[in-house]
Image: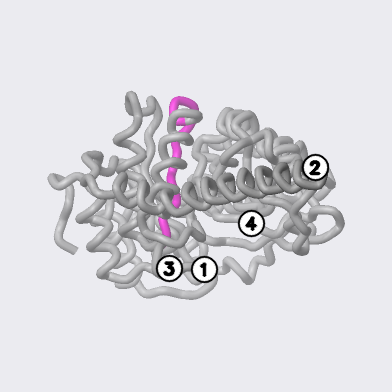
Amino acid sequence: MTGTVRKSRARRVLRRAGWAAAFVLGLILLAPVAAWAWWQPEPKARGTGANAMWARHQWVGEPHTDAEYRALAALLETNRITDVYFHTGPFEADGTVPPDKYRHAGALMKAMEKYAPDVRTQAYLGQIRVVEGEGVIEIDDPAVRAEILRTDEIFLDLGFDGIHYDLEPIYPDDEAFLDLLDATRTLTRERDALLSVALEQPTLAGPLQPVYKALLPRQGAFHYPARPTEDFLLEVAGKVDQVAIMTYDVALPTRSLAGWHFARHTRATLELIGDRTTVFIGVPTYRPPTMPWAEDLEVALRGVRRGIDQLDRPPERPYGVGVYAAWTTSADEWALYRANWLPPETVKAG
């Protein structure tokens, strides 16, 4: 009798486990279907008067003709790009940038002042941050941070309108990064210049950061997702003039799921910090290494627009998209950008 009872209990346990597995599988299968249905309505929101673009290092590292500068200015005007992050780094380990890497920055600044005076030019400076002994630049070292500030001064002296940091990875307990922002903000305020940062997309659930850290294997300097928590993002937003969210590299298997990702991060980020600082949601014009069929500029822009549609009210500060990157954007993609993002009355033939 005892054996029969045990077998009966075992069958019940197996049956319940089977139902639980079926339920979980059903949820997994329903997610793409639900995302597809959510994705179908055409978004109403259109773009704004503030948009950014990451530009290649060759603009400061190589000579250009007057015609090339004029063509760049025309591209910016046609596509309503207000802020350009010209790659001027990367930093050396000591926080410097060798002068031969930006020998043509002065000519670029003169051309921008002549042909695109209303566009804000920012020196895009980045490097791999040392984490647990691995990486290139150790910003925990006060001497390195001081050298970074001296490098910032060089670019502001050359005529750049601001400093744009892209230091990776940055984790939400990175006090050295916050100290660097404080010091840089003091400098940029003295110079009437901008300070902006590029950050990874925020966490889906901030309290899970310690779980990520404990469970996920370390890959070089990147040991768990470098995702800002809400508290960290709020703190950063209070120290800078602009935050560009690197929303791309979605790695989701369908276009509707990828679009949901862009919508979700657009809404969440603008609701959280849109009243504190200018926000640019990064959109890709390159094919990501994983699942390239699901993520492209069209999906990203549609997702951003859906996210804006979900806001109860527009943010108090300017917001827009950041195109990553100029060197991977074709003429057809710029046309798609204008057709899908810019307000119709502002679109120019180009």
- Give the x, y percent position of residue 150: 70, 49
Q: Earlier in the sequence, mark 3 or mark 4?
A: 4
Q: Residues within 10 Å of mark 3 (few under 14, many from 20)?
A: some
Q: How is the image coloured?
A: one colour
Tell me if residue 275 is in the magenta stretch. yes
- Specify the segment rendered in magenta: 274-284
**Closer-to-camera residue (193/113):** 193
- Give the x, y percent position of residue 13: 68, 44
**Predominant secondary structure, magenta span:** strand
How far is mark 4 from mark 2, CA to CA? 72 Å
Tell me if residue 110 is in the magenta stretch. no
- Residue at x 48%, y 58% (from the top left corner): 252
Q: Nearer the viewer, mark 4 or mark 2?
A: 2
Q: Earlier in the sequence, mark 2 or mark 1?
A: 2
Q: Quadrant of the C terminus?
A: bottom left
Q: Nearer the viewer, mark 3 or mark 4?
A: 3
Q: Earlier in the sequence, mark 2 or mark 3?
A: 2
How far is mark 1 from mark 3, CA to CA? 12 Å
How far is mark 2 from mark 1, CA to CA? 56 Å
Q: Which residue is mark 4?
A: 126
The reply to whether callout 2 and callout 1 are in contact (CB within 8 Å) is no
Q: Which residue is mark 2?
A: 1
Q: Which residue is mark 1?
A: 290
Please say if 235 is above or below 27.
above
